[in-house]
Amino acid sequence: GDDATFAAVDLGASSGRVILGRFRPAADGPAALDLREAHRFPNRPVRVRGTLYWDVLDLHRGVLDGLRRAGRLTGGAGIAGLGIDGWAVDHGLLDRDGELLANPVHYRDDRVAGTREQLEAVLPPAELYAATGLQHLPFNTVYQLLAARGTPAFRAARHVVLLPDLISYWLTGRLGTELTNASTTQLLDPRTGDWSPRVAGATGLDTSLFPPLRRPGDPAGDLLPEVLAATGLPGPVPVTTVGSHDTASAVAAVPAATPHFGYIATGTWSLAGVELDAPVLTEESRRANFTNELGVDATVRYLRNIMGLWLLEECRRSWEVDGAPAPLTELLEQAARVPGPGPVVDAGDPAFTAPGRMPERIAEACRRGGQRAPRDRAETVRCVLDSLALAHREAITDAERLSGRAVDVVHVVGGGARNELLCRLTADACGRPVVAGPAEAAAVGNLLCQARTAGLVPGGPDAGRALLRRALPLVRYEPRGDTAEWQRAAERAAQTRKER
Ligand code: LFR
């Protein structure tokens, strides 16, 4: 067969990218994958009149710029297809003509305050968990819709469209709701893969406002003529539904060689857990704050949301030099020289969700837990990374215990796979080997889904993972030292929580 180059649009909370993946089919020798970044653009949320918004038109411009560059990089050949993924839970409202009624609100906006109590009054937490399997996060779509419900925009809305589906709509003119991302709304039943009548009934939210569900691998339309004209891409370009929740695509890109793997998808968030065939909906699981999100290939992503590198990004933002965040490489070099684990915080604490004053909030949390606060930037960075490693350890061991799936190796994928110190500390804290890479996991999973749908990687998900092991550079970290020391640190971290 021929080579085929696909494009992945991957939208993250701090940047968006368009990445090209060239697949050489197995018939020509070992299947191969070459990655090439066509474009990367900042994602800069903006606060207006007290509300934090995503600048979704700016993101769409970034996508179009990326497709134009993709066209240039591929010469006259163009791309064989496109897939779109991004962060979860957020949505846009469309009127009956398909116009966007208002700018999508950022999941870190506090408009959701009070909606948890509102929902609990009509549906007790245990029942909500049994119906949806989702970890309580203050910004799950259900809470955002409850917050939006009274507004004129919501009353005028005929469609509620998740963000990657909105970009897909603008590129193809076709509406749909991708399943893995729908599973993060807390309105979907992970057992049926359909909207939960229980949650819809209790809240009165109309799930038919969501366009019809579609699954990874389903066709999502072709690029519109106006998009081909604006980007110079030769058509037709089919758009394929991929795991449009970035974490679903990232987990699909875990290059595991065994079913006994844990994963940590690290970026703004750390999503740590295991891949299962069926959800775990027990009360114990709910109390442990584990979520059952749907994955590609009818899997369940059984995981916990941990604050992630957001803690570090926010520290760097508060230390910015001439409008640019403090340089990462230097901070990490200095942090690597700090002995640890020293003072630590609970990186699962929702108290860290909101932006602003992060170094101060971390110091306050350390003192609240009876520890000394980090004394300088290096110690603060070390505190963040030790705390993340600890939270990774806790999530992996809890996932193992609650699911019964043994974990022999932990795969770190996403941006944090480039962070050597984080990977090393995670291996030490977990007491298990860490395999790091790919760093662009969401884009790789997105591309792999397209290539598999096109028949270029026959043999199912394991064949896809085998291809990634051959094609991508991976780094292995063996655990060192004493896990008892990390156990003591875990006890210190637990004392720092605001509300327990
Ligand atoms: C990661 C992610 C997480 C989700 C959070 C908010 O990028 O998609 O999985 O909980 O962002 O959408």
Image (spheres, grey):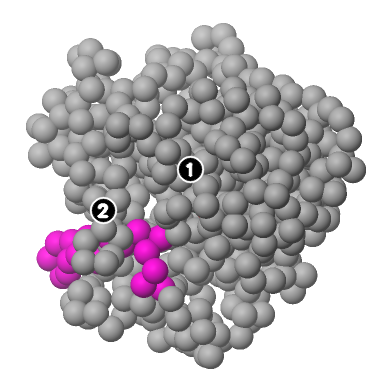
Pointer 2: what residue? Answer: 46
Q: Is residue 224 above or below residue 294?
A: above
- Return the x and y of residue 360 as percentages of the image width and height: 52, 52
Identity of the residue furthest to the bottom in this view: 121
Question: Closer to the camera, 80 or 141?
Answer: 141
Where is residue 334, by image quadrant? top right
For the point 61% across and 85% down, the residue is 124
- Magenta span dominant secondary structure: loop
Classed neighbour count for the residue bearing mark 2: other residues with Cα under 10 Å, few (<14), some (14–19), many (≥20): few
Position above or below: 361 against 234: below
Q: Give the secondary structure at mark 1.
A: helix
Tell me where the magenta segment starts and ends, as one range: 93-112
Q: Is residue 471 above or below residue 428?
A: above
Seen at 30% across and 35% down, the residue is 323
- Residue wearing tag 1: 315
Identity of the residue furthest to the top in this view:
29
Choose between 339 and 250: the one closer to the eye.
339
Q: Residue 119: image x %, image y %?
A: 50, 83
